[in-house]
Image: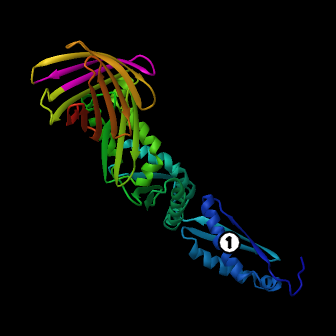
Amino acid sequence: MVYASDDLVETIDVTIVSSHMPPSKIEKRMMASVNTVGEQMIVGRKVTEVKENQITYEKLIKEIFDRVLVGYSVQSVDLRPGLNTALTIEIVPWGDVVRQVSIAYDFGTLSPDIINLIKNDMGNVEEKLNDVLIGLPIDAVDWAGGLSKVAIRESLANLLPEFHANMDIIPGEYTVIKFSLSPLGTTVQDVHVSLRSTTIPNVVLAAVRPTMNETSKILIGLPVAFVERHREYFTAKLLAEQPLTKKYGITVNPLLNAGADTEIALDVETDKYNITLEAYLDMGHDEDNAFARLHAGKIVSKRDEVFLEVNFIPSSVSWEFVPGWGHRLGANTIAGIKYNTSNSQNGLWLQKELNPSWTMRLERNTKNRNNELGLRYKLHDFLSAEYIITKDDQWLRLVGHL
């Protein structure tokens, strides 16, 4: 094709050929490098000038890329000048090429469950590294490794943003990549576990605590953002580890508040039974001012409970048996009747939860028409304080939740 003397090279089209083609990502990197140099040397020059100096250009391009393409030797350069100049470079690898890539993971002291969770987030890292490295000359691994590191880190920035990936590549026919992660941002330093229940005694909940404490240890050292993102996984794991759930079908609702000091609260309840064990110590009241009470109730419907309360009074070494019935009037209010078999007295009672910490109780003895009003404040899971008012007296009661 004949070109006018003022026709200029507008574009350059690069092709790389080899009997042993490099991995596709490396090939694209090579083509981009060749294209950049080719544009600087040829684009904008007169086509006739490039034709006249074709051999010189081809020799110069060969010398440049013999130095730039580490791990490869440039066998030939074929330049076809024109408005769209075609540049074909034939390369061959030096020596051996990478045949296999293996990754040696170092996750420190993380538990196997957490490692599996992280690997699941990471996706197929091995495949990404294989795409870049397998088939590459061993001598080219150093510079291509930088490309693979960038690709992996960019991928993990989206898939696993709470960690920074560290990679050390050991080149060879069987290339080994040492891979580790370092957490970013705030990490979990400590975990506090609390167990709460209105239907199960604390002595029963004590069986849950060792398992909870052991399970919660897996969170220590993890980025807070990672724990927050996988909240559903960790809460499901807490549920799966609970012996009460497995043995008795008890409902466990975990609440996880992730932070440097992470808090885990478990609301443990049952819709079949209502069992509480409490110890009472009255201050400012002399008669039977210390006793213990076991409340054993059976839920017979969504609103109704039949129960037996057993009181033990140490001062007289006596027992009281009080059967009764309770009916739920609303979400926070229960009313009912009970009968003290020891003194043959009937009682009416009403209990209303004002908020999670405050509860009001009203009892009336139908025989002597005495009323008792109690206002209870829950100090923590094991202790409450109740102020009691009657017609003739008032006192403070400490309630231990056993």
- Whether residue 315 appears in magenta in the rendering, the answer is no
Q: Secondary structure at mark 1?
A: strand
Return the x and y of residue 118 as percentages of the image width and height: 45, 48
Residue that numbered label 1 is attached to: 76
Query: As displayed, is residue 195 above or below residue 185?
Result: above
> Is 146 or 80 nearer to us in this picture?
146
Return the x and y of residue 55 as percentages of the image width and height: 73, 81
Task: Determine whether, in the image, residue 60 is placed left or right of residue 324.
Answer: right
> Is 386 or 113 nearer to us in this picture?
386
Query: As displayed, is residue 387 above or below residue 29?
Result: above
Three-letter code for the amino acid on which mark 1 is drawn: Ser
Task: Determine whether, in the image, residue 59 is placed left or right of residue 249.
Answer: right
Return the x and y of residue 139 as percentages of the image width and height: 50, 66
Task: Determine whether, in the image, residue 99 is placed left or right of residue 374.
Answer: right
Callout count: 1
At 54% across and 50% down in the image, what residue appears? Answer: 127
Task: Determine whether, in the image, residue 128 is placed left or right of residue 172.
Answer: right
At 26% across and 36% down in the image, what residue appears? Answer: 210
Asked if residue 107 shows in the view, the reply is yes
Return the x and y of residue 218 as percentages of the image width and height: 34, 45
Screen quadrant of the C terminus: top left
Disc 1: CA contacts within 10 A as few (<14), some (14-19) or many (>=20): some
Q: Look at the image and give the residue range highlighted in magenta.
A: 292-314
Query: As displayed, is residue 160 above or below residue 113?
Result: below
Q: Quadrant of residue 213?
A: top left
